[in-house]
Image (tube, rainbow, N blue to C red):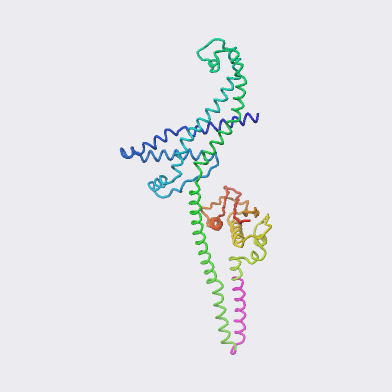
Amino acid sequence: MNRFRDRLRELWWLAVGAAIGLPAPVLLVLVVVSGPASLAAGLGVALFAAAVWACRRLAGAQRGRVAAASPYRPLNGRAWTRLRTVVGDPATWRDLLWLPCQFVAGLGGLVLAVGLWLAAVQCVTAPALRAVLPEPTGFDPAVLEWTGRSGPLTWVLVPVGAGLAVLAHHLPRHLIRGQTWLGRALLEPTAAARLTARVDRLTTTRAAAVDASAAELRRIERDLHDGAQARLVVLAMHLGVAEDVIDDDPAVAKALLTEARTGAGAALTELRSLVRGIHPPVLADRGLAAAVHALVLGSAVTVELDLRLERRLAAPVEAAAYFATAEALTNAIRHSGAGQVRVSLVDAGDTVRITVHDDGRGGADPSRGTGLLGIRRRLSAFDGSLRVSSPLGGPTVLEMELPCGS
């Protein structure tokens, strides 16, 4: 029964492939006539756009079937700019090249697969058909016409039909592999397109990293100016006044020195907090696992940790993973209303996988929150990724991957 279902699935796959390629003649005619139509009535642009749109939908459906990535350039700007991008995109013309190939491969594959089964059935049942239909009719099966209703010949076709059945049983999977190869060869991004996309992505992430670094420097400068620097200025003033009055009023000088000492302690506390925000000492001394342990010690909610880190990672990677985890944990505590958070960090060899799960209200959207955008920007500088699952009502799951080498 399972094998029968597998054969039906293969035939269905081939039928869908034939349906995808079936509009090819119409779309290719539209593309061909769009040029003269533009000169004659100005309708060619609309015809070309419609044909390309339909072709991209069909190619997208095939990509989903053969697990191929999308190769298209991003479309931005007004309609005319987007159309120019489409025309200049090599993927557009590769789609148009793939379409007639899919028409032939899809329709031909389906006809061949179904035809083999039909031929096998007729050959195997040829003697029975001859017995049921001894005289010619207006709708004779093909095997009876081929054999002229000869008894010996119909029995010869029985082993032929068995061979055709075996061929029909095995051939569809090879036809599927052929269509899969064709789809990946013509629909996947070329090496040049992948390189271009890689360069564009690195350019974007580098710009984001530069912006984030500049913002971090501004934050540090502001914290120093508004915090520790202001306290040190007050400390210097107290020490100066104490120096002036120490001979005439030692009690006042003593009180000023006490205030100065208190201010020095507060300034030191702020400087330590600032240093922890830049690069926590525990992260540098004891590694990522210990730093995350220290991070959750004073948490206002229950935090479960699953830390599977058996080695020290590169310092920049550890810092990125730590601050991404810290930001995700802060978001969960402050904004989700969660009562429990689970944090998992797993060293998978070439990547660090970070998962933060909370039981809060959900509804987190990276496009509307600077926290998630900051995490994505921080990870993208290392070619990392962030996936967010946060339906309304919860739970919220952040899945982060950070390349770390071996």
Task: State the residue at coordinates (47%, 46%).
Answer: 72
Residue 266's image quarter? bottom right
The quadrant in which the C terminus is found is bottom right
Give the residue at the far left of this rendering: 40
Name the one closer to the observer, 230 or 292: 292
The N terminus - image quarter: top right
> Is 260 one of the magenta-colored residues?
yes
Residue drawn at x 62%, y 21% is: 159
Residue 227 at what x, y percent from top left? 55, 71
Can residue 156 be seen in the rendering of this structure? yes
Counting the numbered discs, the total is: 0
Q: Is residue 279 magenta?
A: no
Q: Residue furthest bottom?
A: 247
Residue drawn at the location 60% of the way across and 76% of the way down: 264
Instruction: Specify the farthest residue to the top.
Output: 135
| Magenta-tinted stretch | 247-270
**In this picture, residue 131 sits left or right of residue 59:** right
Q: Nearer the viewer, residue 330 or 285?
A: 285
Q: Residue 214, percent across and down?
A: 50, 64
Up the image or down, 9 lies above or below 399; here it is above
Secondary structure mostly seen in magenta is helix
